Amino acid sequence: MILKVKKLILYFIFTILTINVSFAEEIKFAQLSDIHTSKEKNIHGTRLLPYSYQIFNDALFQIKNEKDVDFIAITGDGINLPQKKLANEFIKIMNNTKIPYFWVFGNHDVSKLACFDSNALLKILNSKNKHFKLNNIYDSFDYKNKFKIIVLNAVIETKLTSSGFIDQNQLCFLNNKLNEAKDKNQLPLIFIHHPINPPYYGSKHHEIKNSNDIKEILHKYNKPVFVFQGHYHIPKIEKLNNVLYISAPSLIQYPNAFRIISINKMENGKILIKIESRKTNLNEYSKLSYEKTKNKELYEINDYQEYEF
């Protein structure tokens, strides 16, 4: 009997050690996109602007109750209009979660025409966000040694447009950071609002004008790259060559959802990414947006998806 108990103990110890060895490095984070917090009192099409704060807080409540979340990545349009007051309120709510976060700016967040540009928002954000401080509107930082987080910005701030553009300086920056990742044996994780690879091709005025230039750099890298993007409000995951493009659902309109993402760099050299989609618990609001949604199949999400590289 004693021998059997000892064997069982050894078995459990071996199992735990095996699990720890099989996953050399792991990160887990939430991706929130197109939240559009607003003081609007009217619903705009499918966008539930009057309920934006309730939906936002519901998502954050779910994330706070999720175990082992390393950080929250906001892939643009945290606020519906480029206003200092809205930005300060948004940052205050994020700080109250006590979870590290960074904010990739979208076209609704900033505008030179509204006298609230990226540099103004970045200054406020850096003064109040103690965890992630970006040196520029596009930047990068190493995370847990095995991951390189790259933040890109394609917002055109000098005119009213939903299109994006990445200038030559930023293209060179991306190329250099990918080379750094290769030298350090890191997995590049790219976060951007405008999609490099759109989840839908019927909306030319939302695309990055020179997206092919970015794709050329990414595909030439010839090692796994994960791109997290927003803007279209259409949830889709697509693998092209070495790149997995992960387009986020929107919080402000159906399916009123966010994602929990786990990435494992395993000892055998393979990479496993697990993507869970979580809808808001405020079903009565989501139903309002659903009823107004055309082409509903475009906005449907899978609860769970898994990819191995």
Image (spheres, rainbow, N blue to C red):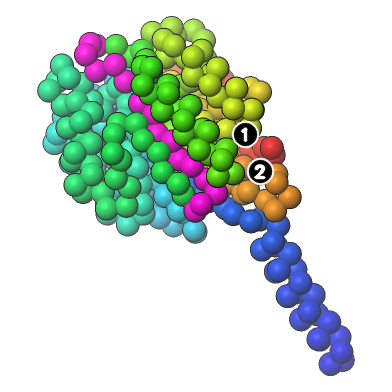
Identify the mark nearer the N-term, 2 or 1: 1
User: As shown in the figure, which amino acid type bears the numbered disc 2?
Assistant: Ile
- Residue 274: image x %, image y %? 61, 43
**Disc on res. 235:** none
In the picture, which quadrant includes the C terminus?
A: top right
Q: Which of 281 and 20 is in front in this view?
A: 20
Q: Which residue is drawn at 38% across and 17% down?
A: 168
- The residue that disc 2 covers is 271
Q: Does dot 1 land on a helix, a strand or a loop? A: loop
- What is the magenta range? 144-160
Residue 181: say if magenta: no
- Residue 267: image x %, image y %? 70, 53
Can the viewer see residue 230? no
- Residue 106: image x %, image y %? 32, 26
Q: Residue at x 28, y 39 (%)?
A: 135
User: As shown in the figure, which amino acid type bears the numbered disc 1?
Assistant: Pro
Q: In which quarter of the image is residue 1?
A: bottom right
Q: Which residue is drawn at 59% across and 44% down?
A: 185
For residue 226, above or below residue 92: above
For residue 233, above or below residue 69: above
Q: Is 103 placed left or right of 27 in the picture?
A: left
- The residue that disc 1 covers is 224
Prevailing secondary structure class for the magenta stretch in the rendered image = loop
